[in-house]
Amino acid sequence: MSDSESDCLFCKLLAGELPCSVIRETDTTFAFRDANPQAPTHVLLVPRSHYPDAAALAAEDPALLVDLFHVAADVAEEEGVAESGYRLLFNTGADAGQTVFHAHLHLLGGQPLGPLVG
Ligand code: 5GP
Ligand code: ZN
């Protein structure tokens, strides 16, 4: 395990070293509730493998990126937001406000969502 992985919060959640509210697990992905939800449904979808951001994930394992979107669609169904609508987004880098440098897809829904930038 590299230094970045041993220091990584989401690698610790994946390893069960820290608690989180798990929604769904697959061989390649992990989905859990955000600790500071920004909407009634706020789930984080993460690859089990450590990539620092979505750009690295896309470059190094595009099939895994697609897996995240499939799991997101399943979670949206389970959470009852598939019909009403939901938002999927990756924060990438400082200006986007990325705080955890293990690629993660946010799934937000359960209410009308505000402007994308605000
Ligand atoms: P970012 O800003 O990097 O795109 O998103 C990181 C997200 O991780 C934030 O929405 C934040 O609330 C969430 N988060 C940070 N620490 C924890 C934690 O320990 N557990 C869970 N479940 N979510 C966390
Ligand atoms: Zn990690």
Image: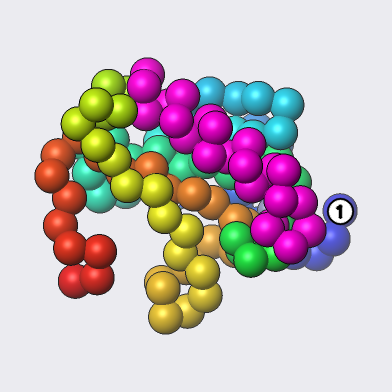
Residue 108 in view (yes/no): yes
Q: Which part of the image, by quadrant, shows the C terminus?
A: bottom left
The residue under the point 18% across, 63% down is: 115
Q: Which residue is situated farthest in the bottom direction here?
A: 95
Which secondary structure lies at badge 1? Answer: loop
The residue under the point 51% across, 69% down is: 92
Q: Is residue 100 above or below residue 112?
A: below
Mark 1 residue crowding within 10 angstroms, few (<14) / some (14–19) / many (20+): few
Drawn side of residue 93 relative to residue 66, left or right? left
Q: Say whether residue 58 is magenta.
A: yes
Task: Give the residue number, with chain letter if any, for mark 1.
Answer: 1
Residue sitting nearer the eye, 64 or 103: 64
Q: Position of residue 34 (x, y in %)?
A: 39, 43
Q: Which residues are magenta?
A: 57-78
Which secondary structure is most common in the magenta stretch? helix
Q: Give the residue type at disc 1.
A: Met
Q: Say whether residue 47 is magenta.
A: no
